């Protein structure tokens, strides 16, 4: 099955943007990643089983593109997280602290934490998207949580 | 409030403040900017040195013509013999209303990379002006052809042609282990476009099938899925390169490196040198920009033509691939760790080949 790209932009632009932001750490690169991901879908003739299959594919493409961009020698923009904490108004301090703490994690923990808490994905699904073993995904989630616990005033429970 | 709710609220706030609406037109603009960064400077030189010659001789625009456009990429002499130019493709599917033909003109592959040039031509002559996927009517024709000082729109109006965006993709990318495909375009005639595709691949089989989808659409600001004409061809490529693999180990450790180098595995083919550096991210700074380069005997860095980014290993260590033009490395090499953001050099380490 295929879904028109305009529909996918409506439904998944935010998911792709925050996943890319999680890796790139700045909105300009994240925006580029989202656009490139939809272009790849648009020009591809790949058939999908269902909507969840499309979403998983888009996320995987976006994550890979964000990683490429992060390491690219040609295209590198740096915006410190402090700048975001100045411009983004959070409902309470703990959300800002959480964002800062998450973004300070090593990338390999950060993206697993993101897929688990933002996308509500199972460890099995995360391992499929990141092409790592389920055990590895579990270890990364556990280490990421431990690091967040030590960084956050309010702690970080395992819910 | 659960962690999940806090997490979603925090990132949704960033999205609300920072995410911009997108449409197909803005996607094209972004793509255009990225492409031009790599090719626009070379395009003018190419007009003078290559484009005119190739066209005058009635030849196609091949891999060497494209690599000559990219100042950082020069194909080594012994890689020339690996270029295949007699590849038989099979048309497996096309839209009913398709007005394009696509053929494979050249391919060059080794165990690690694949470069292919396709020729996309119109079934009906003197009707269309082919432009790259990311080109807009206001773009200058010199960006993808030997025609200068005129925009695509003016040129098309003058010759009463319809502007058609040409693009394509390797569709069995998962099967071949391809993460991303970089592309370039060059037109030798109004309706004949050459598409250059280069990608890294993980599949190391010697013979492999490639499925290529060409897309074409008459330019529109609001292109819909059904407006795109598609044509899929398949063909088989053979990796006839010779692969050698050696391993280097550190002679000593250097705490200034900010990481512990475990080993370097170096793959070499007629086309390139692929340096896989395995290391332990002891200070957890990989994501702060830690990266590597090889230093030659004159103390200068070898030019990198690409890289993999960080690849995490099952045991928790990291690997980063540096791709270079083919280089003859000594039995002892120097690896330098540096920060790719601010260019701070952390330190160097000497490594010796394992006999």
Image (cartoon, rainbow, N blue to C red):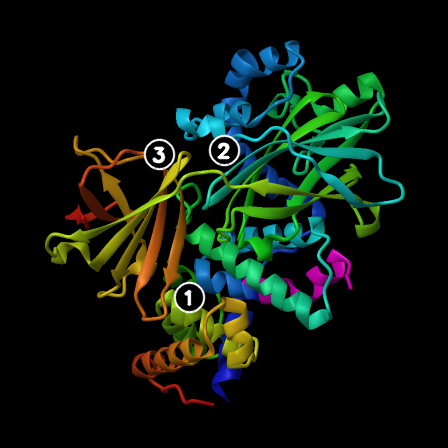
Q: Residue B232 carries which label?
A: none
Chain part drawn in magenta: A1-17
Q: Locate residue A90 relative to residue A44 in the image: left or right.
A: left
x and y, in percent, of residue A130 in the image: 49, 67
Whole-Å distance between the Cαs marked 3 and 2? 21 Å
Query: On what subunit does the disc labeled 3 rest?
Result: B
Mark 3 vs 2: CB contact within 8 A? no
> Is B280 on the left-hand or right-hand side of B187?
left
Residue B347 versus residue A32: which sits nearer the camera? B347
Could one spot residue B70 in this view of the protein? no
Q: Considering depth in this image, is A68 or A103 the residue closer to the camera?
A: A68
Q: Which mark is residue B38?
A: 2
| Residue B168 in view in this figure | yes
Sequence order check: which comes first, mark 3 or mark 2? Answer: 2
Q: In percent of the image, x 71 and y 36: which residue is there?
A: B166
Compared with B354, A58 (above or below) is below
Residue B94 is covered by the magenta coloring? no
A8 magenta-colored: yes
Question: What residue is pinned by disc 1?
Answer: A85
């Amino acid at each position: 099955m295929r879904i028109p790209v305009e529909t996918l932009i409506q439904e998944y632009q935010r998911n792709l943007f925050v996943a890319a932001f999680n890796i790139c750490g700045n909105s300009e690169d994240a925006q580029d990643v989202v656009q490139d991901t939809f272009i790849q879908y648009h020009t591809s003739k790949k058939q999908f089983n269902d909507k969840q299959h499309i979403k998983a594919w888009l996320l995987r493409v976006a994550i890979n593109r964000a990683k490429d961009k992060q390491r690219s020698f040609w295209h590198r923009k740096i915006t410190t997280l402090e700048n975001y904490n100045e411009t983004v108004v959070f409902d309470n301090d703990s959300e800002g602290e959480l964002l800062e703490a998450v973004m300070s994690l090593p990338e390999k923990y950060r993206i697993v934490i993101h897929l688990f808490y933002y996308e509500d994905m199972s460890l099995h699904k995360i391992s499929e998207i990141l092409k790592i073993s389920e055990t590895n995904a579990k270890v990364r989630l556990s280490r990421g949580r431990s690091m967040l616990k030590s960084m956050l005033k309010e702690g970080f429970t395992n819910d | 409030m659960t962690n999940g709710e806090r997490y979603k609220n925090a990132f949704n706030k960033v999205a609300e403040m920072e995410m911009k609406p997108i449409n197909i037109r803005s996607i094209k603009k972004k793509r255009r900017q990225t492409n031009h960064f790599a090719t626009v400077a070379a395009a003018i030189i190419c007009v003078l040195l290559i484009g005119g010659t190739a066209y005058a001789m009635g030849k196609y625009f091949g891999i060497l013509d494209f690599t000559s456009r990219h100042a950082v990429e020069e194909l080594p002499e012994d890689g020339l013999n690996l270029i295949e130019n007699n590849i038989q493709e099979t048309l497996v599917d096309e839209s009913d209303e398709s007005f394009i033909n696509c053929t494979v003109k050249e391919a060059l592959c080794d165990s690690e990379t694949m470069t292919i040039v396709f020729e996309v031509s119109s079934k009906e002559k003197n009707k269309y002006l082919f432009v790259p996927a990311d080109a807009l009517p206001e773009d200058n024709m010199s960006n993808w052809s030997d025609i200068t000082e005129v925009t695509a729109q003016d040129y098309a109006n003058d010759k009463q042609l319809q502007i058609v965006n040409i693009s394509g993709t390797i569709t069995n990318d998962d099967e071949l282990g391809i993460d991303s495909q970089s592309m370039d375009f060059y037109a030798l005639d109004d309706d004949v476009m050459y598409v250059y595709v280069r990608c890294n691949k993980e599949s190391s089989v010697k013979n492999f099938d490639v499925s290529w989808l060409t897309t074409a659409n008459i330019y529109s600001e609001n292109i819909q899925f059904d407006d795109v004409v598609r044509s899929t061809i398949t063909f088989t490529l053979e990796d006839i390169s010779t692969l050698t693999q050696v391993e280097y180990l550190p002679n000593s450790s250097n705490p200034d490196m900010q990481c512990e180098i475990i080993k370097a595995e170096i793959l070499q083919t007629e086309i390139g040198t692929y340096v896989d550096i395995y290391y332990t991210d002891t200070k957890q700074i990989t994501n702060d920009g830690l990266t590597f380069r090889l230093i030659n005997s004159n103390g200068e860095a070898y030019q990198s033509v690409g890289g993999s980014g960080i690849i995490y290993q099952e045991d928790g260590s990291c690997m980063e691939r540096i791709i270079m033009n083919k280089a003859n490395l000594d039995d002892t090499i120097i690896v330098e760790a540096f920060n790719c953001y601010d260019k701070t050099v952390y330190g160097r380490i000497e490594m010796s080949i394992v006999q």
